[in-house]
Image (spheres, helix red, strand yellow):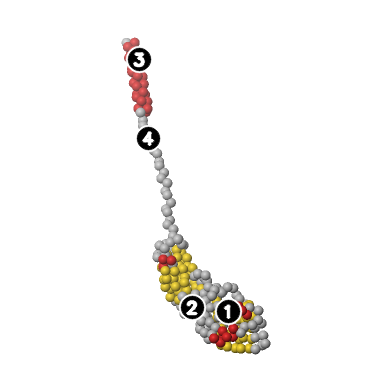
Amino acid sequence: MQMRSETLLLLCGLFFLCTSCGTAKKTQKNNSNKTTTTVTTTTTETKPTEVSTHPPVYIDGGFRKKIFYAGMQNTIKIYAEGGNTAHLEVSVSGGKLKPADVTKGLYSYTDRAYGLAVEVVAKDTASGTIITEIFDVVQIPAPDAYVWTYKKILKGSYAEFTADDFKKQNAVILQHEERIPARCNAETYTVTHINAAGKRIVHKNENKSGLFDETTLAMISLTEKGDVFIFENIKTTCSPFPIKNIVYVIK
């Protein structure tokens, strides 16, 4: 009886051991079949936003910048670099600013009043950029006077003539050292001729274009070496300022 009991216990122990091993193997097999999931993250690079640019706008008053001459047509250039100017809005705080050739950015400014400061404004409607320049409206300065040949280009400042060269001249020419948007004529002036003996002849020349009249031409025709010619009281309507007298000693 005792032997049976021991045999039964041995069989039960073997059965339990086998069952445990099977379970362990099954668990190990199940664990080996687990799926590993890998998550990949993709980073997208953001491109910077493109900023549209516009060419700079310029206001150019020409040779004499920031100056307008009263009573004259003053040309001014308002333009966008390398582009058409049709998109520019142009205005001025005083006087009249008229388009001359918008495709080239050319405008004409006129005003009879002087002693003012006017503001020229150019707005680029494409970019919203606003450019301003201040211009002084002034009177035309006094020109310099020379004896020369009418409508012949003046070559330098002639202060000396021989008698033969002086006899070939026929007018008092007015010219500014810097560019001025006006032609100035010596409308009246007084001519004084003093010869070598000290004899003096005085005549008022009133030719509107500055040309010598018959009396002045007759005086010039008598020119000799050592004579002195004085041109004074020179008047012109293009400038209110006095013009310096000119004196020639004939060589």
Where on the picture, by quarter, is residue 6? Answer: top left
Which residue is label 1 attached to? 168
Checking the image for residue 10, the label placed there is 3
Q: Earlier in the sequence, mark 1 or mark 2?
A: 2
Residue 174 visible in rendering: no
Give the class, few, some or many, for how many residues have Cα within 10 Å of label 4's Cα (few <14, many ≥20): few
Q: Is 118 placed above or below 57 here?
A: below
Give the class, few, some or many, for how many residues have Cα within 10 Å of label 1's Cα (few <14, many ≥20): few
User: Amino acid under label 4?
Assistant: Thr
Marks 4/2: CA–CA distance: 87 Å
User: Amino acid under label 1?
Assistant: Lys
Measured as percent of width and height from the top left, residue 165 is found at 60, 78
Give the class, few, some or many, for how many residues have Cα within 10 Å of label 2's Cα (few <14, many ≥20): many
Q: Secondary structure at mark 3?
A: helix
Whether the residues at callouts 4 and 1 have beta carbons within 8 Å, the answer is no
Q: Residue furthest right?
A: 197
Which residue is label 4 attached to? 37
Q: Secondary structure at mark 1?
A: loop
Q: Earlier in the sequence, mark 3 or mark 1?
A: 3
Which residue is label 2 attached to? 70
